[in-house]
Image: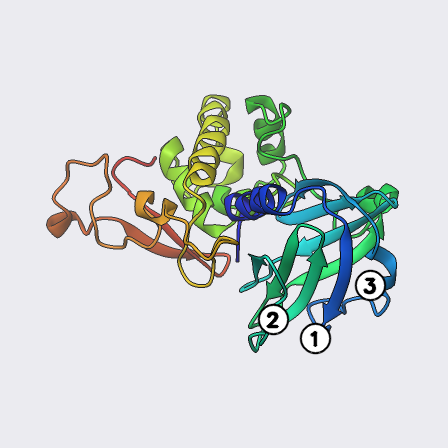
Amino acid sequence: MPELPEVETIKEALSRGIGRARIDDVVVRQGSLRQKVPDDLAAQICGALIHQYRRIAKYIIIDLNNSKSLVWHMGMSGKIKLSDKPPEKPEKNDHIIIATSNGVITYNDPRRFGLLICLPTIELSQHPLFAHIGIDPFDGGLTPQYLFDKLQTKKKTSVKQALLDQSLVAGIGNIYASEILYRARILPQRSSYSISFKECRALSEAICQVLQEAIRAGGSTLRDYQKPDGSFGYFQHQHCVYNKTGQACPDCICNAAKTGGIKKIILGGRSTFYCERIQK
């Protein structure tokens, strides 16, 4: 599933490639996604001008000048393709095609776990999708004190699972949680309650650093993710621990053949990776 860096990359590509265009036509070839695409989607948005592009957690928000907003989630395998004109022969999983005055947006999603709905802009914050979303990692409010206070309330939850809780910090997924905890030198299986204020300072810094670096690299391509121009992100080449079981981490001087290198465990049903020598 695309995480914050991948969603931010897609949002920026839309902003650069389509910009404040007029929506001219909408073709819904398959509307049965995670939530059904509105039957009147075309009627709601055709003729409207795109006002701005935003990201809330892992959702792309496209605000229109008719007081409506498109809410887009990529799901497990969704991707957006940009082109100058509608495809002559749409691919099998091209479910939604939006023609604008400045190009065409095609949504492709083999697993159909994505989502595209239209809401009154004023109602976004109260919608169930966003009502319980936590602070954004790039919000100035993500302070060591904020993290410390929140983690203290999650006594029985591992710090790795806490980072995946979207009501705590929005947008962090499984890949970046492992990388963030490695950067902060914190073992993922530790109780959230055990994380000190000093460690929360390192954790808040690591969250911003890792996500910013991933955005600059265009995100991580492991399976389905592609940028809208069809190219791949390359932050996966900078991963320190994720999916590197048995290897030596970049900052370790141990002999991985003797120590076993990076470890893999399952926390909350998710694969988790760490170095037991430098994470404490």
Q: Is 205 left or right of 8, judged from the image as shown?
A: left
Secondary structure at badge 3 equals: helix
Q: Residue at x 33, y 55 (%)?
A: 243
Q: Mark number for residue 210? A: none
Secondary structure at badge 2 equals: strand
Question: Does the residue at mark 3 contact the one at mark 2 (Cβ under 8 Å)?
Answer: no
**Image quarter of residue 202:** top left
Amino acid on which the number 1 mark rests in the picture: Arg
Whether residue 189 appears in this view of the structure is: no
Front residue of 24/117: it is 24
Counting residues from the start of the chain, the first of labels 2 and 1 encountered is 1
Counting residues from the start of the chain, the first of labels 3 and 2 encountered is 3
* Residue 23, x across and y down, in percent: 76, 54
Tell me the crowding category of disc 2: few under 14, some 14 to 19, or many 20 or more residues within 10 angstroms, Cα based. many
* Residue 32, x across and y down, in percent: 72, 74
Tell me the crowding category of disc 3: few under 14, some 14 to 19, or many 20 or more residues within 10 angstroms, Cα based. some
Whether residue 55 appears in this view of the structure is: yes
Question: Does the residue at mark 2 contact the one at mark 1 (Cβ under 8 Å)?
Answer: yes
Front residue of 273/140: it is 140
Amino acid on which the number 2 mark rests in the picture: Asp
Q: Mark number for residue 42? A: 3
Amino acid on which the number 3 mark rests in the picture: Ala
Q: CA distance from mark 3 to mark 2?
A: 17 Å
Q: CA distance from mark 2 to mark 1?
A: 7 Å
Q: Is 151 left or right of 223, judged from the image as shown?
A: right
Q: Which residue lies under the disc numbered 1?
A: 29
Q: Which residue lies under the disc numbered 2?
A: 94
* Residue 81, x across and y down, in percent: 56, 59
Q: Is 202 left or right of 239, judged from the image as shown?
A: right
* Whether residue 139 is situated above or below residue 80 in the rendered picture: above
